[in-house]
Amino acid sequence: MALMLLLFAIASCERGPEQIHYGSEECAYCRMIISEPQYGSQLVTKHGLVYKFDSIECLAAYDMSGEVQADHVHSLWVPDFPAGPEWVPAEEAHYLHSESLRSPMGLSISAYSDYDEAVLHQQQYRGSVIGWDVVREIVKQEWRLQHSQN
Amino acid sequence: MKIFNSTRSVPSGRWSPGMLHPLPCSRQRLQHSSAKKRSTVGLAPFFFGLLFMLTAIATEAPAGTGSGELVVRPQGPVASIAEAIELAEPGTTIRIMAGTYNERELVISKKLTLTGEGFPVIDARNEGFILKVLADSVQIRGIEFRNTGVSYTRDHAALLVEDANGVVIDGNRFTDNFFAIYLATVRGSLVANNHITASGTREASSGNGIHLWSTWDIEVTGNTIRGHRDGIYLEFAKGALIYENVSNGNLRYGLHFMFSDDSHYHDNTFSNNGAGVAVMYSKNVKMTGNRFVENWGPAAYGLLLKDISDSQISGNLFRDNTIAIHSEGSNRIAVKNNHIIRNGWGVKVMANSQNNVFSSNNFIENTFDVATNSRRNYNTFEGNYWSRYDGYDLDQTGTGDVPHRPVRLYSLIVEQNPASLILIRSFFIDLLDLAERIMPTLTPETLIDEKPLMKEVNL
């Protein structure tokens, strides 16, 4: 029993992004099956629970919903768009908001670890390069409208 | 909503095959039709007037005349489709004879009809897109599209229609493409009788069969779709009419609805899809006469409702699904005359779903007829047939004398602790359910069918 507890303690020490099983796991916010590695994101709590999302906008919306209390959130992770599922902390990433790159929930947000990459993609797909705060703001504004009927 | 570009007005009438000029004009359209008029010299003057008033397309007439036709054949004078498109005057019908054409990235920006004879194949050999339509009233028939490249931008569709009206895509085949048919900002068009298959095995490398994004009044009918990510996908598709399609064996959803108000889908078959059918973030959706069958898996549903309101689900068949109907954040839905048979869960209603009415449905041999995650109930169940009901009808009214409680105590236990499913056939569980039914303490008190039917509803 003590050994098990110890193992458990060790296992839960390492907190960070997990592998997402694309095509079989559900988004914790919108319940869609997560299927696009360029957009799948995750939230890790201080207890080591991992919530997975099909898009960056769902991650932002879930984080703002208060479903997990702000002081229980350990970290937020978004995938580097050019590199496939390589995890970047949400607050440090750069984002492209461009209608030509259509993310699963329709808000057209993709993430980049490298600012130059983001600008490079902007040149190809237009739109604007933004930070995490603006992403949250966009989600807040766009979805308050859409979900207001409920 | 920002996405609906305010410079466009929504057409009031629905497109129908019999209507030739149903749509309002845009500036492009006016220029376009004046070009068209030149090619119709010789027609009666009153007809001219009519044309002008409707600001529409030259009729089918020039296409029937010899000059309005171009033939493409593998060893003919015009041997490539690209060349034919280049040569053709607006209004021309291009006849493509049987054979394989290794072409890609074709662009149509004038009104043309492409008709295949003996199913000619356009093979992109796994690179790029195949055909992009940027003009109104283009018709594509009888052609097989094969092997687009894979990329995550919308361009990589076998057939992409963008910013157009009145397009007809009828009776084509699509084989092993990333996206097969992709409509973006399109109005009043028809997608009918296409046969769409893909052999993608990983969801991430496979696009959707029929993808509508930002469309108005599109009709999708008589298509079969297999092996794509989502069979039919609608996002910001207002007033879509989806009927008599068969969407089987797709990797994610057979039909996937997002932000698509005022749509109707009926008499479709959705079976063996990875996760069933998902209808999300929409209002005023009618779902009638569909078949949701054999959608098995840990996250699979016959029908997943997420944030849906003021909608109607009637006359459908739900058979052999893990969860027939899962409702989350969905309000004011009338669920009537459905046949819900042999599913793991018949109906799962989460506590955030309110004012839904379930009436005259048949709940037959489901492991759990109704499950919920709350003791409270804000929904109405009335006059359904429950095969699990064991009361009598001594007064011969056709409804049972004692109310039926469709939520088993055991379903609550399973909801909280999925592993307890292992006890499903045990005597202890039967005892527990019976005790709870006699003296409810944990199941929702008001979730009761006061008038359970003694006989199945004839559907």
Image (spheres, helix red, strand yellow):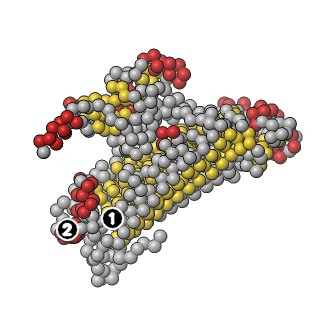
Answer whether residue B222 is visible to the viewer in this image.
Answer: yes
Mark 2 residue type: Phe
Mark 1 residue type: Thr
Find residue B279 and report its horizontal and vertical position in percent: 44, 49
Given this view, does label 1 or label 2 mark the residue nearer the observer? 2
Query: Which residue in the structure is indicated by mark 1?
Result: B367
Give the chain letter at badge 1. B
Question: From the viewer's perspective, is residue B431 above or below residue A124?
Answer: below
Query: Which residue in the structure is indicated by mark 2?
Result: B428
Is disc 1 surrounded by few (<14), some (14 to 19) or many (20+) residues within 10 Å?
some
Horizontal arrangement in the rendering, residue B449 relative to residue B188 (left or right) = left
| In-front residue for pair A110/B361 | A110
The residue lying furthest to the left in this view is: A2
Q: Please tell me which residue is depicted at 34% across the width and 48% down the height of the picture.
A: B329
Q: Please tell me which residue is depicted at 46% across the width and 60% down the height of the picture.
A: B293
Find residue A60 and report its horizontal and vertical position in percent: 34, 32
